[in-house]
Image: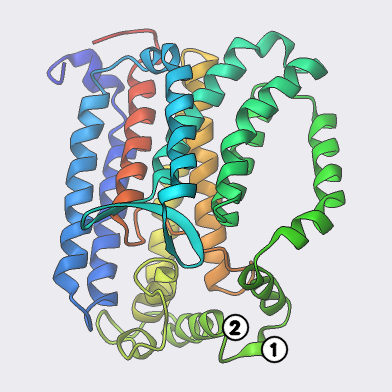
């Protein structure tokens, strides 16, 4: 397959190379962020996850993505079973019971479930595309789509649940959902805010309070954001240099290798480092949108749309929360934040997109 001229012509080298550059950028910054700890262990995990991801990408390229569509019900059941298992045997971290442990190994099922649900929702919408604006059909799609999001919300992992809600609505919109339903959903969401508020945990409410007034708890729930803003501001244009950021290297910045890694970039690599990252993300998002537009069918287009929407909300929310312009939700930055499960799942997403891209004219290899 890999020596086929038609494959090489259609393979999106720009997206693939951008993914490798983003992953390399992430490993470099993680090395600096963890320099005061066991840096080698963090780097090793991230590098292994990236290499495994590249291998998985080329495995996926040999599989027609339509096969995943035929198996969508099995994928859906397995995804929900994994999420339910987390509720019973999950390990609690950062206030959420969202991890499963096997011996010394831990992984977050929701990261892989996101991929499965994107595939399943894409196929279910594709099956019902001609009746998507009929209330009964739309209701079926929404119930089918939101069951995993509700389970994740119960963990409780509000940030990941919101990611699900976002990419589901973007996929529905791209599939041709009438705008009036989006407006109805927005109104219903606003009306349900009191119910959502009372269902939040104490630490989740504190995050909202401190977002509105960062000065109310500078040594507690506001501490992360305040230190992050200090780090980003102190980097100025060129940054202090890798391994030289005072907030980063002296331990003032919490979660510096995952949730707040953009603050490390701001402090040590400055505005220039942040702009380089933004350019890479822009190229990635542009290629995702173009592949979605050029896909051979609605199913493939919706998969890429779901991936693009998921990546976009992760990037927007992560950078926004580190700068204090969005509430803290604990959502990591794709390809940059530390996390073996997260890195591997992102690489799998790119593999699916590249798969759809090379088959845009209906060719198989």
Mark 2–mark 1 Cα distance, whole angstroms, equals 7 Å
**Residue at mark 1:** 216
Identify which residue is drawn at 40% across, 13% down. 66
Question: Horizontally, is 208 left or right of 261 in the view?
Answer: right
Q: Where residue 298 sits in the image (x, y, percent)?
A: 55, 16
Within 10 Å of disc 1 (Cα), the crowding (few <14, some 14-19, many 20+) is some
Q: Quadrant of the N terminus?
A: top left
Question: Horizontally, is 58 left or right of 142 in the view?
Answer: left
Residue 334 shows up from this direction: no
Q: Where residue 190 sits in the image (x, y, percent)?
A: 84, 51
Q: Nearer the viewer, residue 329 or 346?
A: 329
Q: Nearer the viewer, residue 351 or 237?
A: 351
* Corner quadrant of residue 85: top left
Q: Quadrant of the C terminus?
A: top left
Residue 72's tag is: none
Q: Nearer the viewer, residue 213 or 70?
A: 70
Q: Where residue 354 sits in the image (x, y, percent)?
A: 34, 28
Within 10 Å of disc 2 (Cα), the crowding (few <14, some 14-19, many 20+) is many
Secondary structure, mark 1, is: helix
Q: Where residue 9 sits in the image (x, y, percent)?
A: 26, 20
Way the structure is coloured: rainbow
Secondary structure, mark 2, is: loop
**Residue at mark 2:** 222
């Amino acid at each position: 397959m890999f020596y086929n001229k038609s494959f090489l012509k259609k393979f999106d080298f720009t997206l693939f190379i951008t993914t490798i550059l983003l992953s390399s950028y992430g490993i470099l910054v993680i090395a600096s962020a963890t320099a005061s700890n066991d840096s080698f262990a963090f780097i090793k995990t991230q590098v292994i996850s990236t290499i495994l991801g590249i291998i998985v990408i080329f495995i996926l390229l040999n599989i027609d993505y339509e096969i995943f569509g035929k198996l969508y019900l099995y994928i859906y059941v397995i995804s929900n079973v994994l999420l339910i298992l987390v509720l019973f045997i999950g390990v609690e971290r950062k206030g959420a019971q969202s991890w499963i442990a096997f011996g010394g190994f831990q992984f977050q099922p929701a990261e892989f479930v996101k991929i499965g649900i994107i595939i399943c929702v894409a196929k279910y919408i594709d099956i019902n595309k001609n009746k998507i604006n009929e209330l009964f059909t739309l209701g079926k799609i929404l119930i089918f789509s939101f069951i995993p999001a509700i389970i994740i919300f119960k963990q409780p992992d509000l940030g990941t649940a919101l990611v699900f809600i976002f990419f589901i609505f973007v996929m529905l919109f791209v599939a041709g959902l009438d705008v009036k339903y989006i407006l109805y959903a927005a109104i219903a969401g606003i009306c349900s805010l009191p119910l959502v508020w009372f269902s939040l945990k104490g630490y989740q409410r504190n995050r909202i309070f401190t977002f509105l007034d960062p000065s109310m708890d500078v040594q507690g729930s506001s501490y992360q954001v305040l230190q992050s803003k200090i780090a980003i501001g102190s980097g100025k244009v060129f940054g202090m240099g890798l391994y030289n950021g005072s907030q980063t290297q002296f331990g003032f910045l919490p979660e510096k290798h995952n949730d707040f890694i953009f603050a490390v970039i701001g402090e040590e690599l400055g505005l220039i480092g942040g702009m380089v990252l933004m350019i890479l993300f822009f190229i990635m998002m542009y290629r995702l949108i173009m592949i979605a537009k050029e896909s051979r069918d609605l199913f493939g287009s919706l998969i890429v749309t779901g991936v693009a929407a998921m990546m976009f909300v992760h990037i927007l929310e992560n950078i926004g929360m580190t700068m204090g312009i969005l509430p803290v939700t604990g959502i990591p930055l794709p390809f940059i934040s530390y996390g073996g499960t997260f890195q591997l799942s992102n690489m799998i997403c790119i593999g699916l997109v590249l798969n759809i891209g090379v088959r845009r004219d209906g060719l198989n290899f």
